Amino acid sequence: MVRRPAPPPPPAAPPAPGYLSINSTPWAELSVDGRVVGNTPQLGIRVTPGRHRLVLVRDGFAAETTWVTVAPGATVKNTGLTLTRVAP
């Protein structure tokens, strides 16, 4: 009897996406990894699992940059971001 090699295993399923819910005081334009997603608050932004760079900008305020790490299937909430007013 001739044995055939076992077929290769099926490819692994891609990891489940993660989500971001971001708010700031005052509102600001939010970018995730260099892509503008809109003004805060933003809820349920779909992202790949891993580390992401958030940038919040608003005229008259210093830009705020922060990093978050999102696990597969998880939602990261960051609602305590406060922008600092800059002197005119």
Image (cartoon, helix red, strand yellow):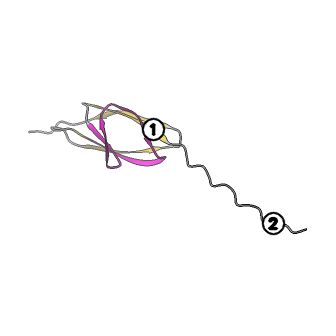
Label 2 crowd bin: few (<14), some (14–19), many (20+), radius 10 Å: few
- Residue lying at 48% horizontally and 41% vertically, measured from the top left: 18
Of the pair 1 and 71, the residue shown nearer to us: 1
Residue depth check, mark 1 versus mark 2: number of the one nearer the observer:
2
SS at mark 1 in the image: strand
CA distance for labels 1 and 2: 44 Å
Residue marked by disc 1:
19
Secondary structure mostly taken by the magenta-highlighted segment of the chain: strand
| First-in-chain label (1 vs 2) | 2
Q: Are marks 1 and 2 in contact (CB under 8 Å)?
A: no
Residues 35 and 26: in front is: 35
Query: Residue 84, image x and y in percent?
Result: 21, 37
Reply yes or no: does residue 3 show up in magenta: no
Type of the residue with mark 2:
Arg
Please tell me the numbered disc located at residue 87: none
Q: Residue at x 25, y 35 (%)?
A: 28
How crowded pointer 1 is (Cα within 10 Å; few <14, some 14-19, many 20+) is rated as many
Rendered location of residue 50, percent (x, y):
47, 48
Boundaries of the magenta span: 29-56
The location of residue 59, given as percent across then percent down, is: 16, 38
Circle 2 SS class = loop
The answer to whether residue 61 is left or right of residue 45 is: left
Q: Is residue 28 left or right of residue 9?
A: left
- How far across and down, in percent of the image, does residue 26 sit? 24, 30
- The part of the image, by quadrant, that contains residue 77 is top left
- Vertically, is 86 above or below 8? above
Residue lying farthest bottom?
2
Q: Disc 1 marks which amino acid? A: Tyr
Q: Nearer the viewer, residue 84 or 52?
A: 52
**Residue that badge 2 annotates:** 4
